[in-house]
């Protein structure tokens, strides 16, 4: 069967563009903000091992499954699944994956935009010299004051959502590609710069030991669960974002190699972020590795506050975190956006505004979680923000990813898979079968069973 490239009006302009777009989706707050703080809360080393294993054994096959499904269907995830279900004669129930992804996307973007708003706010804090020469205690104080001001946080949340909407409204080539092409290369350079800085002024040995010293005694059951959930979150898999991007991949791009590249870039950036942040934490007696969501917003300003040109580089850095966040945000909303456009033939711009509005509204719950509603708990000790973060990362993405890989590896007819992967026998084919049919789904199940019943 010929590739149905012609049926998809939007295509990435090259293989590199797809790699940058998917890496732009993968590299985001998950790498720079979340990974260091959850590694810190879970004691480092052993958590990192579990996370890396989950990336390699579970995340990569699922990402390949998403790209192949997306390109085989060439539509939004919901309609792609619908079309592939028809071609495979499978149960319509599989399209639920697409719906769950849309819901997950709203929830994720709602809190994601709030944290990205923190980064935006910090561009101006760093730029105006607030941190220059400030003590650690003063820098922590600035952060605490910010968390206590719902209006300021709401303002920046709104700015971030508006920026996301403005980009996605312009479409795949003029909007998404444009943003990605500019933001990604600069981001890589700045992260390297920061690691270099941490090597010079931080306690690099301690930071390195924390990330790579494998003390399995420090690993808790919740830590294992979080490591797997984070592997999904950081690779953007399990909710259809990569499937939506897969629909725009030109027919001649090889999926396995591309997916490996994307996952490697994501992992390297996360580890680099850890190597930039922990040496600074350990060089500073006032800071703790397990500080939680504020880790990045306290350690980095302290570091920059005492660095020559720190205000300038710090400003740049928060600009880049914001860019990293926006190249992810645009992918989180794409499954819902693409579906609405296909289904109702409304312009992307209108749909973008409407869907952005929904995420913005949900995000208010996360804004308030840090102040007015900080004592309102949803399930256990979790605030609204903690809860949304938890259900999406620990439940929705792994369940979505599990079903996606089952569908691609067990249900989809072999000729569709072969056509997408470009091989149908030999070592590569066997590897796909082993990873997609067995290792990835059983890996997810094992973590679920272990963390839910045996703990
Ligand atoms: N991968 C992104 C990050 O690490 C977040 C994301 C999750 C993007 C789910 C798309 C889908 O920041």
Image (cartoon, rainbow, N blue to C red):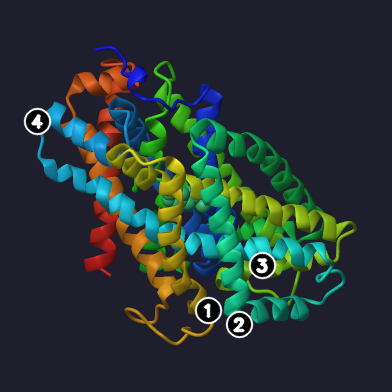
* Disc 3 to disc 4, C-alpha distance: 51 Å
The tag earlier along the polypeptide, 1 or 3, is: 3
| Residue 311, horizontal then vertical, whole percent | 84, 61
* Disc 4 to disc 2, C-alpha distance: 54 Å
Callout 1 crowding tier (Cα within 10 Å): few <14, some 14–19, many ≥20: many
- Where disc 4 sits, the SS reads loop
Marking on residue 439: none
* Disc 4 to disc 1, C-alpha distance: 48 Å
Marking on residue 89: 4
The answer to whether mark 2 and mark 1 are in CB contact below 8 A is yes
Marking on residue 297: 3
The answer to whether mark 1 and mark 3 are in CB contact below 8 A is no
| Residue 107, horizontal then vertical, whole percent | 38, 61
* Disc 2 to disc 1, C-alpha distance: 7 Å
The tag earlier along the polypeptide, 4 or 2, is: 4
Marking on residue 370: 1
The tag earlier along the polypeptide, 2 or 1, is: 2
């Amino acid at each position: 069967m010929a590739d149905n490239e012609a049926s998809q009006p939007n295509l990435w302009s090259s293989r590199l563009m797809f790699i940058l777009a998917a890496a732009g989706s993968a590299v985001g707050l998950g790498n720079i903000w979340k990974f260091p703080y959850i590694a810190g809360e879970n004691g480092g080393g052993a958590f990192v091992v579990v996370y890396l294993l989950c990336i390699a054994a579970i995340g990569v096959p699922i990402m390949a499954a998403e790209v192949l499904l997306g390109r085989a269907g060439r539509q939004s995830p919901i309609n792609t699944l619908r079309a592939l279900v028809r071609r495979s004669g499978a149960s319509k129930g599989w399209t639920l994956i697409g719906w769950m992804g849309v819901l997950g996307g709203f929830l994720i973007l709602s809190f994601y935009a709030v944290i990205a708003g923190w980064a935006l706010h910090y561009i101006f804090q760093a730029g105006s010299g607030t941190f220059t020469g400030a003590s650690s205690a003063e820098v922590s104080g600035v952060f605490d004051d910010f968390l206590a001001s719902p209006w300021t946080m709401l303002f920046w949340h709104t700015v971030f959502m508006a920026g996301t909407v403005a980009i996605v409204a312009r479409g795949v080539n003029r909007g998404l590609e444009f943003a990605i092409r500019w933001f990604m290369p600069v981001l890589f350079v700045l992260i390297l710069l920061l690691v270099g800085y941490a090597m010079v002024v931080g306690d690099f040995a301690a930071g390195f030991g924390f990330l790579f010293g494998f003390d399995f005694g420090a690993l808790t059951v919740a830590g294992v669960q979080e490591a797997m959930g984070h592997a999904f979150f950081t690779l953007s898999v399990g909710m259809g974002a990569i499937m939506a991007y897969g629909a725009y991949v030109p027919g001649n791009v090889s999926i396995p190699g591309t997916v490996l590249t994307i996952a490697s870039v994501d992992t390297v950036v996360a580890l680099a972020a850890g190597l930039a942040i922990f040496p600074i934490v350990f060089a500073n007696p006032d800071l703790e590795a397990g500080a939680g969501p504020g880790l990045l917003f306290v350690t980095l300003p302290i570091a920059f506050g005492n660095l020559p040109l720190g205000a300038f580089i710090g400003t740049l850095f928060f600009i880049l975190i914001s860019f990293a966040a926006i190249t992810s945000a645009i992918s989180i909303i794409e499954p819902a956006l693409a579906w609405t456009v296909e289904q109702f033939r409304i312009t992307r711009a209108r749909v973008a505004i409407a869907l952005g509005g929904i995420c913005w509204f949900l995000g208010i719950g996360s804004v308030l979680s840090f102040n007015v509603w900080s004592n309102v708990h949803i399930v256990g000790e979790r605030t609204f923000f903690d809860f949304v973060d938890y259900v999406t990362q620990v439940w929705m993405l792994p369940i979505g990813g599990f079903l996606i890989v089952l569908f691609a590896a067990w249900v989809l007819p072999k000729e569709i898979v072969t056509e997408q992967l470009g091989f149908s026998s030999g070592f590569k084919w066997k590897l796909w079968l082993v990873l997609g049919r067995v290792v990835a789904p059983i890996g997810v199940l094992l973590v679920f069973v272990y963390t839910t019943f045996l703990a």
